[in-house]
Image: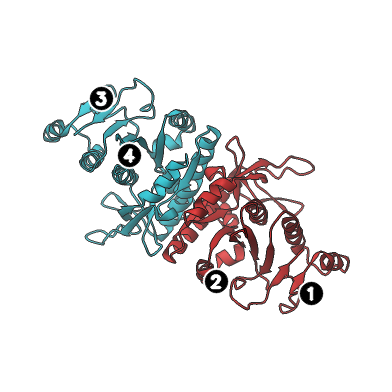
Chain colours: A red, B cyan
Amino acid sequence: MRKQDLTIVKIGGKLIENEERLSSFLNDFSALNGLKILIHGGGNMATEIATKLGFPTKMIDGRRITDANSLKVIVMTYGGLINKTIVAKLQALQANAVGLCGADGNSIVSKKRAVKEIDYGFVGDIETVNTRFINSLLEQGCVPVFSAISATREGQLLNTNGDSVAAEIAKAMSSIYNTQLYFCFEKKGVLANPQDENSVIPEIDHKKYQQLLEEKVISEGMLPKLHNCFEALDHGVNKIFLGNADVLKMGNSCTKIIK
Amino acid sequence: MRKQDLTIVKIGGKLIENEERLSSFLNDFSALNGLKILIHGGGNMATEIATKLGFPTKMIDGRRITDANSLKVIVMTYGGLINKTIVAKLQALQANAVGLCGADGNSIVSKKRAVKEIDYGFVGDIETVNTRFINSLLEQGCVPVFSAISATREGQLLNTNGDSVAAEIAKAMSSIYNTQLYFCFEKKGVLANPQDENSVIPEIDHKKYQQLLEEKVISEGMLPKLHNCFEALDHGVNKIFLGNADVLKMGNSCTKIIK
C-alpha cells in the first residue's frame, strides 16, 4: 500500500522577521492539503533581545556560542514568542497547530555537543525523534509546529540547528509517510550565480551536486543545507525543495533536490 | 461506572522563582499516580525582563495592564522559558510532559476583556476549553503543562489569570473525569490569622465560607481564589485543596474546599 503524504516545511529567521511575508507564507502553508509539520528558526530576534538584556553574543571563529544566558533567550524567543505567535495565526487560519519544542512529548532527544576545539555551549545534536508522539498528533488532525530546540534525556534544553531538526524529523517520519521536505530561506533556490537572483538551478541530483562542488559554484551558506538534503534523501525522504517564502505557491521557481 | 481520577495542579509564581522549591515540587508532582495536568503562572520574571527591555509596567488602580509589549514578554517568559524548563525537568523525571498555551490545539479559547472603566489590554476571559484535545493527550499518557496564556478564535494571544485557567480546565474536564484541583501558593492554606502561618483552616464549606466572609477573616488576595473554588465545585469539580509547595506530600496540612 502506498504511504500517505506528509509535507514538512522549515522556515528561516529572515522570513519570520517580516510580518507581511510571514502572514503570506502561513496562508500558503495552512492551505496545503494533507498532513503537515512546520519547523521554524528565530532569526535575529534572540540576538536583539539578548543585547537589550545585557547578554553579549559570544562568537568564536565566526560561530555563535550558546552560553546559559543565550539559551534562556533562545527558549524565550524561539520556544515562546515566535512559536506561539505562529500557532495562534495558524489556528485563526483553521490549521489546528500545536507548538512544540523537542522536550515536549520527548519529541526530539539530543545530546550536548562534545567539546573539541570549540565549546559551542548548550548546543544539541539530535539522537532520536519520537515518531509515535508526532504521529499521534498528525492522526488527530493536528499540525505540529516545532521551534529549533531539543532536550537531553536529563532535561537539559539545547539550542539546535533548525535545518537539522527539519531533516531529522523528515527522515524519522519517512518510516510511516511519503515525505516531502521544503526549506524556505531568502533565495529563490540554489543559484548558479550568487549575484543573480534568477539563476536558480531547477534540479540537483547527486552527480550535479558533485559537479557544483568541484566548480565551487555553491555559496558557503548553502553547503551544509545541501549536505543535509542529500543525507535526508539517503535516509528515506522522498522529495526536497529549496526556495523562498513563495516556495509553496503553485508554479513558483525553486530548486528540487533528487537522488 | 465510576469516572477515572484526574489531578489538576496550579503553581504560582513565587514557587517557580525558587529553583530548589520548584525541583522539590516537580518531584512530588511527577510521582503522583494517575492522570494529571499542571498549570503555572510566571511570577515576577515577566516584570523583571520587561523592565530590562525598557518596557515599563503599567498599572491602573493597582491592577496590571497588559499592553502589546507586556504581552510579548509574557509569551516569552511564561509560554517559552518557564513552560519549556518545567517540561524538560518533568521529562527527566519520567513524566511525559507536553507544554502548551491556549492557542495550541485551540485548547483554551478566550475573548479579550471588554473595556469598561479600565482597559486591561491584552487580557483574556476564557470561553471554552477543548476537552477533546486535552483528553487525547491524557489518553496517550502525556502530562499537559499549561502556561496561563489563552487565544481568541482570531489568533490573538491573551494574558490570562492562572487560577482561572486551572479552574476552567478542571470544570471542563469534570465531564470526563473525577477531578481534584490543587492550588499551590506561598501559604500553607487559608489562614484564620494572616499573621500566623500555622492557623490553617483545615476545611471550608459553603457555610463556613459565608461565615469567614462576614467575619472578614479572609485576606484580600484569597477572596478571588475562594470564589473560583466554589464556582468550580458548583460546576462538577470534585475536591479542591489550597496549600503551599508541599501540598502534594502525604499528610501535609492544607485547606480542603468542599461543597
Q: Is residue A218 above or below residue B215?
A: below
Residue matched to label 2: A21
Residue B176: x %, y % from top left: 32, 42
Q: Chain of mark 4?
A: B
Drawn side of residue B168 relative to residue A253, left or right: left
Frontmost of labels 3 and 2 is: 2
Q: Secondary structure at mark 2?
A: helix
Residue A231: x %, y % from top left: 75, 55
Which amino acid is tagged 1? Answer: Ala
- What number is the disc on residue B177? 4
Drawn side of residue A92 relative to residue A204, left or right: left
**Tags 2 and 1 on a common chain:** yes
The residue closer to the viewer here, A183 or B121, is: A183
- What number is the disc on residue B200? 3
- What number is the disc on residue B173? none
Q: Residue furthest top?
A: B251
Label 3 or label 4, whichever comes before in sequence order:
4
Which amino acid is tagged 3? Answer: Val
Which amino acid is tagged 4? Answer: Tyr
Quarter of the figure that contains the C terminus of chain B: top left
Measured in 3D between alpha carbons, the distance from the residue under mark 1 to the one under mark 3, in whole angstroms, is 75 Å
**Tags 4 and 2 on a common chain:** no
Q: Chain of mark 2?
A: A
Measured in 3D between alpha carbons, the distance from the residue under mark 3 to the one under mark 2, in whole angstroms, is 56 Å
Q: Dot 4, crowdedness within 10 Å: few (<14), some or many (≥20)?
A: many
Measured in 3D between alpha carbons, the distance from the residue under mark 3 to the one under mark 4, in whole angstroms, is 29 Å
